[in-house]
Every structure is written in structure tokens, then in C-alpha cells.
Image (cartoon, rainbow, N blue to C red):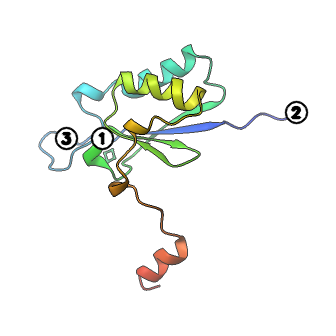
Amino acid sequence: MGIPQPSFYIFKCEQSAPPGMPKPSCVREDTRELFQHLGMKLMEKGLIATVQPVRTGCLNRCQQGPVMLVEPGHYMYVELTKEKIDRIIDEHIIGEKPVEEYLIDEEFWDAPLSPVEAMKLSGR
Ligand code: FES
């Protein structure tokens, strides 16, 4: 038997902007510990072998930050707190039922454009 691939990837935006920048960022004084919290919770639950947390740059939903994307499925969680992360791990990762109330509003997360559609829109 080979090495099992992860069952989930969790991409956590770790972008921070200097104070005074007009664009908000996901890592601020009050949200600095969220990635560490995510990793610790996954370890505590014995999930680190199958759930891969990944630090990323901006995921382009800064106004709703802090955000994280759970794959597979393109589940974008917004306005994260430690308590929300705990519930997402229990209900989505372990219970396989996404926490609907923490997901981004459809208005900001519509169906994806196919690469062919995107190329047409850009005139290529
Ligand atoms: S800074 Fe996190 S989504 Fe843009």
C-alpha cells in the first residue's frame, strides 16, 4: 500500500498588510493565531495525517477575512474565529457536513468560470 493522499486541504489566507493600507487583510493583531490554532486542533484530533493545512497569500475575498478554503469542494469560510475553526473541524472535516452559516455569501462566490469562458472574456 502506498502513502495515502490527504482527504482535505485547508488553505488559510495568511496575507497581512501594513497598518494604514486601504485594503483589509486576513492577518491582523486579533487574528494572528488562527493558523496555529488550526494546526493545533488538527493535531489534537489526530487528523494531521489526512488533513493538510496550507498557508496561502490573498484569496481575493479580503473584505470577508479572515478566510480559509476547504478542498475538495471549494468551501470558502469567512470571518473566522477560533470557535468557528473548531466547529468547522468537528462538523465539516469529521462530520462531513459543511457549516453553512460560516460559508461566504453566494453573491461573493458564484459558480466558477471555465478556463475556456475566461479566455473568451479576456479576448484570447
Ligand atoms: S488578504 Fe486574505 S483574502 Fe485577501
Q: Nearer the viewer, mark 2 or mark 1?
A: 1
Residue 1 is tagged as 2
Q: Residues within 10 Å of mark 1 (few under 14, many from 20)?
A: many
> Secondary structure beneath disc 3?
loop
Q: Nearer the viewer, mark 1 or mark 3?
A: 1
Side of 10 where 110 appears, left or right: left
Q: Residues within 10 Å of mark 2 (few under 14, many from 20)?
A: few
Mark 2 or mark 3: which comes first in sequence? 2
In the image, residue 72 sits, relative to residue 42, either above or below, namely below
Residue 18 is tagged as 3
Q: CA distance from mark 2 to mark 3?
A: 48 Å
Q: Residue placed at 53% from the left, 32% from the top?
A: 92
Residue type, numbered disc 2: Met
As drawn, the residue found furthest toward the left would be: 20
Quarter that holds the N terminus: top right
In the image, residue 52 sits, relative to residue 62, either above or below, namely above
50 or 107: nearer the viewer: 107
Mark 1 or mark 3: which comes first in sequence? 3
Place of residue 99 in the rendered image (x, y in percent of width and height, measured from the top left): 46, 34
**Residue pointed to by mark 1:** 65
* Mark 1 lies within 8 Å of ligand 1 (Cβ measured): yes
Q: Residue placed at 56% from the left, 48% from the top?
A: 73
Side of 84 where 22 appears, left or right: left
